[in-house]
Image (tube, rainbow, N blue to C red):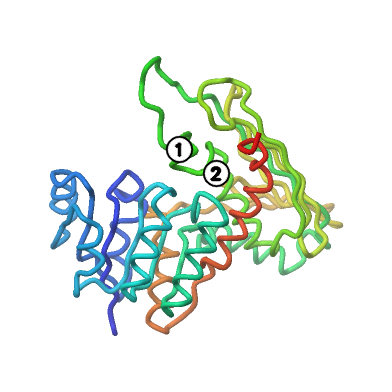
Amino acid sequence: MNKVRWGMIGCGNVTEVKSGPAFKLVPHSELVAVMRRDAALAADYARRHQVPRWYCDAEELIHDPEVDAIYIATPPSTHMAYTLAAAKAGKPVYVEKPMAVNAIEAQAMIDACRAANVPLYVAFYRRALPRFQKVKELLAEGAVGELRYVTTVQYQTALNVADGGALPWRVQPELSGGGLFYDLASHTLDLLDHLLGPIAEVQGFASNQAGLYRAEDIVTGTYRFESGVHAVGTWCFSAYAREDRNELVGSKGKLVFSTFGHEPIRLETAEGVQEWAFEAPKHIQQPLIETVVQDILGLGTCSSTGASAIRTNRVMDQMAGSYYSR
């Protein structure tokens, strides 16, 4: 194989700019088929993005002989079923984040792909962005000395939920696994896993304070990395304004950066302050998709796999799981 021909299941907003176009821009990659249950919407997406074929049945796309690999861009509740079907067909899988609604389903996905001898990748694309590669480089260089602890503060205003209106799938636990914590905090937790290594111990609390929907809207957690670094995090989704800040504090300084923003990375030490600015790629998943394609073709490696992503599912389950077991 000298080119990966992709079939995409799901044609929602995430695929319009963030991911879909990247499959045609990455070297040795092509998007050849898309699927959406609504045939008219599937046909419209294929027309607008110049994709040769469209389907309204996932099995037909998965078994298309001209599709080499499957990109699953649906809510987490369907990730496991589509991954198992793709693995059974012997095709590599690239699945949206979070990997699954919980770690049990994530493990089933890993087991199925391992049994079929096909790779499994997860769209935690921040791992491949130059912005966060710089953070990893600074940590490796000892810019903050020996790392001691991490603090994460992420909050935003509440969803504008109209009376009687349909709730976004991201706050329907049966579709997403939980609330916005599962959708958004997963990015930060996976990024910290990438930067600092696996988390060894976790404690957390989750609540619903605003009462706008059934899912949790605030989560606080304390955790310790295998390296011995301590961390605390608070994620609130019914606050007065928006904040997105991670601080990595060491023996000689600290690094400050956001997960979702694009303001400069900031290094503070006794010698002063340094900053590094980066522009976000137009198609923000493109750098990670390039590593996925290289991995499939045996030309490189991808750091975001099922094996790494399940760790984030486990951490989220431990932080927020008790909320759903009451």
Tell me the SS state at disc 2: helix
Confirm whether residue 297 shows in the render. Answer: yes
Q: Which residue is mark 1?
A: 170
Query: Vertically, is 27 above or below 74?
Result: below
Q: Which mark is residue 182?
A: 2
Which amino acid type is shown beneath numbered disc 2? Tyr
CB under 8 Å between callouts 1 and 2? yes
Quadrant housing residue 85: bottom left
Q: Position of residue 107 (x, y in %)?
A: 54, 63
Tell me the SS state at disc 1: helix
| Residue density around tag 2, few if under 14, some if 14–19, many if 20 or more, within 10 Å | many
Q: Quadrant of the N terminus?
A: bottom left
Residue drawn at point x = 47 percent, y = 64 percent: 109
Residue drawn at point x = 51 percent, y = 25 percent: 213
Q: Position of residue 147 (x, y in %)?
A: 80, 59
Residue drawn at point x = 81 percent, y = 53 percent: 230
Which amino acid type is shown beneath numbered disc 1? Arg
